[in-house]
Amino acid sequence: MTDPNDQTGEVGGLVAEVAHMTAQQRADHEAEVAEAVAPDREIGVEVGATLLELRDVTLRFGGLTALDSVSFGIRRGEILGLIGPNGAGKTTCFNAMTGVYRPTSGRVLLEDKPLGKATRHKITQRGIARTFQNIRLFGEMTALENVVVGADARAKTSVLGALLRLPRHHHEEQHAVDRAMALLEFVGIADRAADKAKNLPYGYQRRLEIARALATEPKLLCLDEPAAGFNPAEKEDLMELIRRIRSDGYTVLLIEHDMKLVMGVTDRIVVLEFGKKIADGLPAEIRENPAVIAAYLGVPDDDAA
Ligand SMILES: Nc1ncnc2c1ncn2[C@@H]1O[C@H](COP(=O)(O)OP(=O)(O)OP(=O)(O)O)[C@@H](O)[C@H]1O
Ligand SMILES: [Mg+2]
């Protein structure tokens, strides 16, 4: 990895440059950033086709059934909301999709191919990235370094190549730094690129997690309560970012508790309760669904109906 002190100067320079650009230069620069954020990726499926599918996924922890025969699909280009009361199994879904846990039964398929026993690293390479409900960053690394490390998850050079400093490694490293900087800009935190992650304000850390996930060039980006702890204005800003991420060609799976927010940004919503899927539909349908209302109000379906 490059000397962090060198990067400090470099990053400061980049940000200062942006501040002094003409309108045309700024437009060109934004186009460059957009290209770096969403390079031409081989997606393998058409917009609208199923990108990821859960088929009868059951996941048990001892006697507790955290997911109970859950099935749903995510279409490419979609923002899909995953909601449900606390303990419903939302995070467990992410864990089953990213290789943290293997389903007790059932299958997860990415582009029609089962994840099977793929490791977390392999799943990242296949195109699923996530953020965590409890932020997980390398606190002692700078924001920029955190994103470079994210990009590394996809790099083709071997560790040996890195040790021998093969030309391809050097090229990839420079590319990773440029792209990381573009990603920080995209999520709106480039001004603090050289700060240690642990010193960033909470909202910046949440955005940094997203930048790091995007660095792996995922086909599917899974966000686990990215707006937790935000005030309404911050939440609205974050939803705007999620819309931009989708416009750039990513598919997004979003766990979010704030109903108003989730209704405003998603195309479709899947609802879990006690590990079971209780609804799957358009936001307007979900809002009116008696089982969903009952789940959130904590009253039996019969009473709600
Ligand atoms: N590693 C684990 N070991 C045992 N039980 C677990 C484990 N992970 C999750 N659970 C249990 O599985 C159930 C679903 O948990 P999960 O974290 O998926 O819920 P969630 O929908 O994400 O809730 P929240 O909104 O609170 O984040 C809960 O009862 C939880 O206690
Ligand atoms: Mg959770």
Image: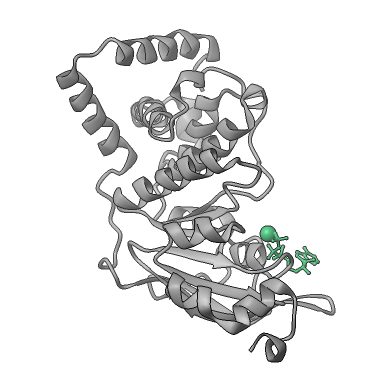
Question: Dividing the picture into quarters, in which one does residue 67 lie?
Answer: bottom right
Q: Is residue 182 left or right of residue 97?
A: left
Q: Residue at x 24, y 48 (%)?
A: 40
What is the total number of numbered labels drawn onto the structure image? 0
Q: Residue at x 37, y 47 (%)?
A: 245
Relative to 4, residue 204 above or below: below
Quadrant of ligand 2 in image? bottom right
Side (left or right) of 85 relative to 14:
right
Where residue 114 appears, as percent x and y from the top left, is 48, 74
Which coloring applies here? Answer: one colour
Residue furthest out toward the right: 63
Report the residue that reaches farthest toward the left: 24
Image coordinates of residue 177 in percent, x first then y, are 41, 26
Residue 222, above or below 146: below
Residue 66 % position (x, y): 73, 74
Q: Is residue 224 left or right of residue 184?
A: right
User: Residue visible at 47% across and 14% down?
Assistant: 7
- Left or right: where does residue 271 sit relative to residue 155? right
Is residue 28 or residue 227 the one in the foreground? Answer: 227
Closer-to-camera residue (143/43) = 143
Q: Quadrant of the C terminus?
A: bottom right
Q: Is residue 296 above or below residue 184?
A: below
Judge whether residue 51 can be spotted in this image.
Answer: yes
